[in-house]
Image (cartoon, rainbow, N blue to C red):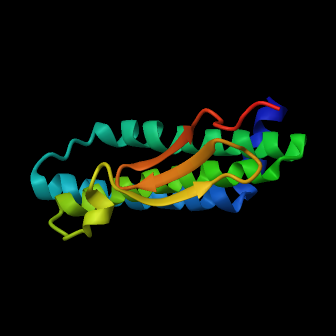
């Protein structure tokens, strides 16, 4: 049990985790406001929201960060964090739109890519961030075998 406690304490020291938790809580408040505004608010969904958003995002980011530190690939946590944040931004934009806040088309259009990042040192893999969140795309390496 001490190992789990130590991991959770270490997890909370990560700036990325604090940012994710804060962002999830902001999304929660906006989702509640949107639910009240549209008449769709259900108190029982609050726990589910935190369970489905907060726990998986924090645990995946923390696990990748720990793995990266232990295996010497610290950079690995950055694209995971970017995916989590892009997904949270897309959720936030959707909830703000439900509240009647006009959103730019690039934030709400499902198939529009805003940013594409080629991951350095990982051939054939890129991070695509758009209106529907973020995805890691792995493409077959098109180079000729040596």
123 versus 117 height, above or below:
above
Q: Position of residue 23 (x, y in %)?
A: 48, 60
Let me know if residue 75 appears in the view.
yes
Residue that appears at 16% across and 55% down: 36
Q: Position of residue 98 (x, y in %)?
A: 18, 58
Query: Split into 4 quadrants, where in the image is the C terminus?
Result: top right
Task: Residue 13: name its quadrant.
Answer: bottom right
Residue that appears at 35% across and 59% down: 92
Q: Is residue 4 left or right of residue 102?
A: right
Point out the residue furthest to the left here.
Answer: 39
Q: Is residue 53 left or right of residue 77?
A: left
Q: Position of residue 94 (x, y in %)?
A: 27, 56
Q: Is residue 72 left or right of residue 51?
A: right
Q: How many marks?
A: 0
Let me know if residue 6 appears in the view.
no
Q: Is residue 47 left or right of residue 142?
A: left
Depth check: give the residue in front, 72 or 23. 72
Q: Position of residue 80 (x, y in %)?
A: 62, 48
64 versus 15 height, above or below:
above
Depth check: give the residue in front, 75 or 53. 75
Residue that appears at 70% across and 50% down: 77
94 versus 61 height, above or below:
below
Depth check: give the residue in front, 139 or 40. 139
Depth check: give the residue in front, 44 or 65. 65
Query: Split into 4 quadrants, where in the image is the N terminus?
Result: top right
């Amino acid at each position: 049990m001490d190992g789990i406690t130590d991991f959770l304490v270490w997890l909370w020291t990560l700036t990325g985790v604090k940012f994710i938790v804060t962002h999830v809580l902001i999304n929660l408040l906006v989702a509640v406001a949107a639910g009240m505004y549209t008449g769709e608010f259900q108190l029982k969904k609050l726990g589910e929201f935190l369970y489905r958003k907060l726990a998986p995002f924090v645990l995946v980011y923390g696990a990748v960060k720990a793995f990266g530190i232990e295996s010497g690939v610290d950079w690995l946590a950055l694209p995971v964090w970017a995916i989590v944040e892009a997904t949270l931004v897309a959720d936030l934009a959707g909830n703000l739109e439900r509240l009647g806040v006009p959103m730019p088309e690039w934030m709400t259009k499902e198939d529009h890519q805003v940013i594409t990042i080629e991951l350095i040192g990982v051939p054939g893999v890129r991070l695509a961030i758009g209106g529907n969140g973020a995805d890691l795309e792995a493409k077959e390496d098109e180079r000729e075998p040596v």
